[in-house]
Amino acid sequence: MVAMKIRDMKENKSPGVDGIPPKLLLEIVEQISIPLATVFNLSLKEGMVPLEWKKTNIIPLFKKGSRNKSENYRPVSLTSVICKLLERLIKDHLVDFLVKNKLINPSQHGFLKARSCLTNMLCFLEDVTKWLDEGSPVDIIYLDFKKSL
């Protein structure tokens, strides 16, 4: 499982505070998978992760507009690649469990495979059309979070 997740990593991503880039893990995947699985299992058993994994490098990432204005940047946290690997493994197991046991609301589209903003919008439009056809009142509120922090 760990080896498979390492192989799924994009090698050009930035490392976290520990300086370990995904490319390194990809190059030593056969040697590192079992030791990492051991550390991950111990971490899950103890309910703790190494403190080093919790540290981040926060860098400004340019969005658009003038490079001289701070509001045209957004903060990006560069976290440990190894910690992100553990997080992905946990997420995959949780999502798999929730989907198999039908514990996710059908209107959820945010983090599921084969679902997107487009599928969410299509389901929403289908619901609104059904309600209007039934003569039900429909109120829609749009919020714009473009400049929110």
Image (tube, rainbow, N blue to C red):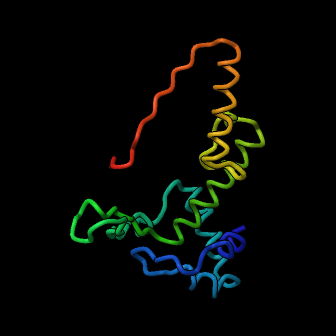
**Quarter location, residue 63:** bottom left
Residue 132, image x and y in percent? 65, 18
Q: Judge by depth and name the residue closer to the eye, 96 or 36.
A: 96
Q: Judge by depth and name the residue closer to the eye, 5 or 69.
A: 69
Residue 16 vertical position relative to residue 54 in the rendered view, above or below: below
Residue reaching furthest right?
A: 100
- In this figure, what is the number of numbered marks? 0
Residue 15, image x and y in percent? 46, 77
Q: Judge by depth and name the residue closer to the eye, 74 or 141.
A: 141
Residue 83, image x and y in percent? 52, 66
Q: Quadrant of the N terminus?
A: bottom right
Residue 88, image x and y in percent? 61, 60
Determine the residue positioned at 47% across, 70% down: 80
Residue reaching furthest bottom?
A: 27
Determine the residue positioned at 64% across, 49% down: 116
The answer to whether 96 appears left or right of 147 in the picture is: right
Residue 95 vertical position relative to residue 29 in the rendered view, above or below: above
The answer to whether 86 appears left or right of 99 in the picture is: left
Determine the residue positioned at 65% across, 32% down: 125
Residue 92 vertical position relative to residue 108 in the rendered view, above or below: below
Q: Judge by depth and name the residue closer to the eye, 135 or 53.
A: 135
